[in-house]
Image (tube, rainbow, N blue to C red):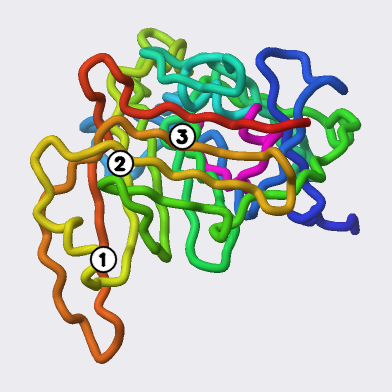
Amino acid sequence: MTTPSIGTLGQVAIDSALPFDTSSIPLEIVLPETLHEEAEIIETNGMRGTVEHNKERTREGLKRVSGSIKVPCSRLALDTLLPYITGSAESTNVFALADSLPEFVMMIDRGAKVYTYSGCRIARASFNGTQGQMLFLDLDIEAETETTGAAGSFPALTMPTEKPYIMKDGVLTLQGDTRLFNSFNLTIQNQLNTELFENGLTRYDIPMVDRMISLATDHPWDTDNTDLVAQALDGAAATAVFTNDAASGDVLTFAMAAVQYPNKTPTNQGRDVTRLPLEGMVRSSGTTKPLIITNAHSA
């Protein structure tokens, strides 16, 4: 009997194109990871004088490749992933939003086999955290194809060692004032057309057709935060700045042109601190893009 594969011994790498080699970028992910192929089996399913289904009357159908990974936010990981989230290359640490997304390739070592995913796009990127925890980046990925390689074919790569961001690093500014908050979730929803198979069984393209951005935070309900209820329709600019106390010069900034909040009056939910959960849409203001991300670092 052979030794089974162990999830903690798996590895993930990303690159702009094949092949994978020692220049590919390794990523530390928080398990589980779920990127995988699901293939259909289609059948005639017609009137055939019996209720039995015959295997000879089947064919292989569409193959969809989708899944998610979770990455602790840190300087190198963000430099690698932000171009595929925003659609634009880095310009002096700044990542602006574009109207299309570049594709990338991903390799996952699952012990007994090594899987390569081509034509990957990021459908959803959620920067999120809760009090006392790390700042994470959850990614939903859509890909065109999955191929299987032999065990041991993953390249020799050195995993990242830079310090990750934590929630304590964050300063949130809404309506011009800094706010206490115990949870943070900035989500970029890249709406993709995942059904372009045409006369093939795998996707031949996965274009972005729209984008939605939302900001969800949670605050104590007190007199310092009453101005966050019944805000003006046009909303206001907002920023979330994470300054890494453990890595000098590492500063992650989310600059939002306008956050619009539908009014929701806070209520008492129990015999505890009353909370003010907010969830708004991040939108452009004039010619200013809805979101600009800066991943500054001195290294």
Which disc, if any, is residue 214?
2
- Look at the image and tell me whether residue 201 can be seen: no
Q: Which residue is mark 1?
A: 224
Q: Check the picture and name the quadrant holding the C terminus.
A: top right
For marks 1 and 2 on the same chain, the one whose residue lies earlier in the sequence:
2
Amino acid marked by disc 3: Lys
- SS label for mark 1: helix
Does residue 92 appear to the left or right of 225 in the view shown? right
Place of residue 234 in the rendered image (x, y in percent of width and height, measured from the top left)? 13, 35
Classify 159 as above or below 297.
below
- SS label for mark 3: helix
* Residue interval drawn in magenta: 65-79
Classify 2 as above or below 288.
below
Q: CA distance from mark 1 to mark 2?
A: 23 Å
Place of residue 279 in the rendered image (x, y in percent of width and height, measured from the top left)? 25, 51
Place of residue 109 in the rendered image (x, y in percent of width and height, measured from the top left)? 76, 39
Q: CA distance from mark 3 to mark 1?
A: 68 Å
